[in-house]
Image: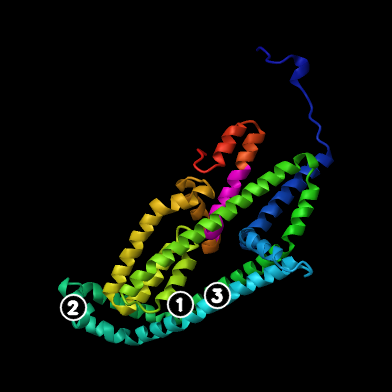
Amino acid sequence: MARLFPKENADFEVTISTHTIMRVIGLTALTVLLFLAVRESLHTLSLIGIAFFLSLALNNPVQWLANRLPAKKKNRRSLATGISVGLIFIILAGFLAAVVPPIAKQTSGFLSELPQLIDDTRNGEGALGGFVERYNLDSQVEKLSSELSSRLDNVSGSAVSALSKIGSSIFAMLAVLVLTVMMLVEGPKWVKLVEGMVPSSRRDRVRRIARDMNKVVQGYVNGQVILAAAAAILIVPMLFAMHVAYPLALMVVVFICGLIPMVGHTIGATITTLVALFTSPAAAIIVLAYYILYQQIENYVVQPKVQANSTNMSPLLVFIAVLLGASFGGLLGALVAIPVAGCMRILILDYLEGRNILSSATVKDAKTPGGDI
């Protein structure tokens, strides 16, 4: 039988020291513990990440305000941050004071009139009853009525669950707000500290990456504000024309919802349509149709032009980023998904350029509006 190896090479011995074995075991255990720690603190890490990108978005306005405060003022950065946060609180308080009481009043009135509305619908009375009778929707109304009754029987459990979720959401929003304020105040100090830790030979490269990321975040924020403002302004004439209650408050609702990418307009359309439903079913249908028409125009005509100078990502990448962000951090995750993806794109392009996989000209073209990557 032929030997594939010479006899002297057939037998060999591998010696592994105890130190090496213990080192491998220790690194494996450390990796597992790190993975478990990240998994357990995933929600907290997501809040920290969201606060980080919100602080990036608010950095320029805060810095602009700090530069215009008197030079003799100490801690101008902290004072500018406090003024900015105070203005945000005032705006939110005014918004809630304008929106919550009338919506709560209308909802209470609607719930009190709901049994009579159901009876009128069953008997073919009223506008809704005539609509049901005309199109033979009696069976659907009976089915909806029975489902509504069963849900009302379980309203206590649903209310407790809803209150628990609302409480968790409020706590998360407060945590993000506090983290954002602290990052705005201490951000410049941390930036200088990190720059000092970077070798001088790589400092220019790190500054360039940070500058590109800041442009992505600022461009995204500016684009979303423009789109949200356009949607809010254009919905007001229709609300006045259909005599929908509280049109100016709804304009603010549409503006805030418009800041959330992809899913924001769906939320805004739902709230606006529900409020219009208190006026009449016809008004709700017309407002919803108008909102859907505007959303299509914005998605395919307005948004590509507005966002052309921000992240420069393809619609497919934007959609995937928002889906991942929403599954990771809910609405807040969807809010920061696009700038996160844009910053990751900057890092990937820099890595490919550093490894000579992409030329500098290709990377430069990718970072300009209308780039190919």
Picture quarter containing residue 120? bottom left
Q: Position of residue 221 (x, y in %)?
A: 55, 58
> Callout 3 environment at 10 Å: few (<14), some (14 to 19), or many (20+)?
few
Mark 1 vs mark 2, CA separation in Å: 33 Å
Point out which mark residue 130 bears: 2
First in residue order: circle 1 vs circle 2? 2
Out of 142 and 338, give the one closest to the viewer: 338
The residue lying at 74 percent from left, 54 percent from top is 191
Mark 3 vs mark 1, CA separation in Å: 27 Å
Q: Secondary structure at mark 1?
A: helix
Residue 171, can we see it?
no
Kindly identify which residue carries mark 3.
Answer: 92
Q: Secondary structure at mark 2?
A: helix
Residue 332 is a magenta residue: no
- Predominant secondary structure, magenta span: helix
> Callout 1 environment at 10 Å: few (<14), some (14 to 19), or many (20+)?
few
First in residue order: circle 3 vs circle 2? 3
Q: How many circles with numbers are drawn on the protein?
A: 3
Point out which mark residue 361 bears: none
Q: Nearer the viewer, mark 3 or mark 1?
A: 3
Tell me the magenta residue range: 333-347
Q: Amino acid at mark 2?
A: Gly
Kindly identify which residue carries mark 1.
Answer: 158
Q: Position of residue 363 (x, y in %)?
A: 59, 37
Depicted 355 relative to depicted 78: above or below: above
